[in-house]
Amino acid sequence: MLKLSLSEENYLKTIYALEEKGEPAHNQTIAQTLRNTPASVSDMLKKLTKKGLIHYEPYKPIRLTSKGRQLALSIVRKHRLWETFLVKCLGFTWEEIHPVAEQLEHIESELLISRLDEYLGYPKYDPHGDPIPSPDGKLQPIEGFPLSHAPIGVELVVVAVKNDEKDFLSYLNKINLSIGSSIVIIDKIPFDLSIEVDINNRIINLSHLVASQIIVNHESNH
Amino acid sequence: MLKLSLSEENYLKTIYALEEKGEPAHNQTIAQTLRNTPASVSDMLKKLTKKGLIHYEPYKPIRLTSKGRQLALSIVRKHRLWETFLVKCLGFTWEEIHPVAEQLEHIESELLISRLDEYLGYPKYDPHGDPIPSPDGKLQPIEGFPLSHAPIGVELVVVAVKNDEKDFLSYLNKINLSIGSSIVIIDKIPFDLSIEVDINNRIINLSHLVASQIIVNHESNH
DNA sequence: AACAAAATTTAGACAAAACTAAATTTATTG
DNA sequence: CAATAAATTTAGTTTTGTCTAAATTTTGTT
Ligand SMILES: [Mn+2]
Ligand SMILES: [Mn+2]
Ligand SMILES: [Mn+2]
Ligand SMILES: [Mn+2]
């Protein structure tokens, strides 16, 4: 199977992540995510095209080919399995794991990943609630909806968060919110779209921005 | 602390390994180990000198500075902790671990390594019997001597092997020899310096080359 | 000590992945 | 529908780490 460089892997993963979020993958978006210049991105896009990993027509949004998606998914699988390992085995907190998993995801060993998967008990979701792709690249979509769109007065369970940034996750720690937490919306404030919620019998106000990145459901996925 | 590239780390580790084996680190030796040309090695040695990591005078053997040794030891520490993890947690055999640890040793995270160390119960030796440097670069030397130099008729314990090559380790698997195995030398054959040994009540002949790379002691280190 | 052989360094080139600045293409809008 | 503005590509550099071929230094041998 095609061997990719570290950079190529990071580009593929970025394009996949945009696709997953439903955002069109434009040069600029990729450049911002990777903190590269658009000129560098142009160069790499040509290279990935030549390798058959993306569909690329200048100025049009970039799409992964099925081979490209397959490779991207295998990197995402590794990322999420390592994140799970860091939390379940090594006692990392969810805001500490992303930068380490960014490195570990590039380790190349089929055996390592299948053994890690087994060791962890074949987890379906990572510590942020994101689905872990199976070895053949299938993934179980998250069942849920943003807390910002949930009804008042109903008991909800947090199943995922849609943001890996340290500041966001530390804030959730501070208000004692994690995957599996129960939440009830007490009130909605029309003025700024913030909501008042009950988390572990403590009432707090969550901004719309925060609430929109917390995915909840009526029962746990796990 | 000084940040090293992947290549720089591999050069430092190679120089350290030669030093550990007592072989003078000449350009050629380093080139062979890393499968690079002597010209490339010359270039890198200049760079490492400028960074204060080696003592380098053209044509003289290369020695690590104390800063260089410190960095090399931290890579060795990571390598050996990961090897231990692969065997103890993921069920790898000792001939499978080296290439994977070669990749994992470059992951940069203090927290990751200290947590891994803790998770493994602060092991003193890796699966090949090599000592694992402490966080401050101290290492507990192996107590033992080569099987080729051991006396006849005495019960011995295997404490280490001085060769990581797959072929060598697979052979040891085949004859059921591992760290902790009991061995008694039954006879020595002067003609080719091979020895007849009893391993788990099976008598076999070991060549001098093999016996010289098996380190034994009168009792286990572990 | 002189000379051949071996080891090492130097010179010059190259590929990968980034950059800046300039040119070009596409999008927006008055 | 021009004409700006924005996005993207192209051209030309740079850095890192490698290579080959040639020059140089050291070592070993008569
Ligand atoms: Mn992550
Ligand atoms: Mn995650
Ligand atoms: Mn090893
Ligand atoms: Mn080892």
Image (cartoon, coloured by chain):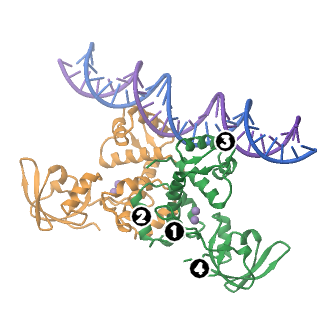
Chain colours: A green, B orange, C blue, D purple
Q: Amino acid at mark 2?
A: Ser
Q: Is residue A198 left or right of residue B57?
A: right
Dot in front, 2 or 1: 2
According to the image, label 4 marks what residue?
A220
**Mark 1 belongs to which amino acid?**
Thr
Question: Does the Cβ of the disc 3 residue fall within 8 Å of ligand 1?
Answer: no
**Badge 2: few (under 14), some or many (20 or more) residues near its Cα, within 10 Å?**
some
Give the mark, 4 or 1, whose residue is nearer the N terminus: 1
Q: Secondary structure at mark 3?
A: loop
The residue lying at 61 percent from left, 74 percent from top is A143
Determine the chain carrying the residue at label 3: A
The chain that hosts pointer 1 is: A
| B131 in relation to A6, above or below | below
Sequence-earlier tag: 3 or 1? 3
Tell me the crowding category of disc 1: few under 14, some 14 to 19, or many 20 or more residues within 10 angstroms, Cα based. Answer: many
Q: Chain of mark 4?
A: A
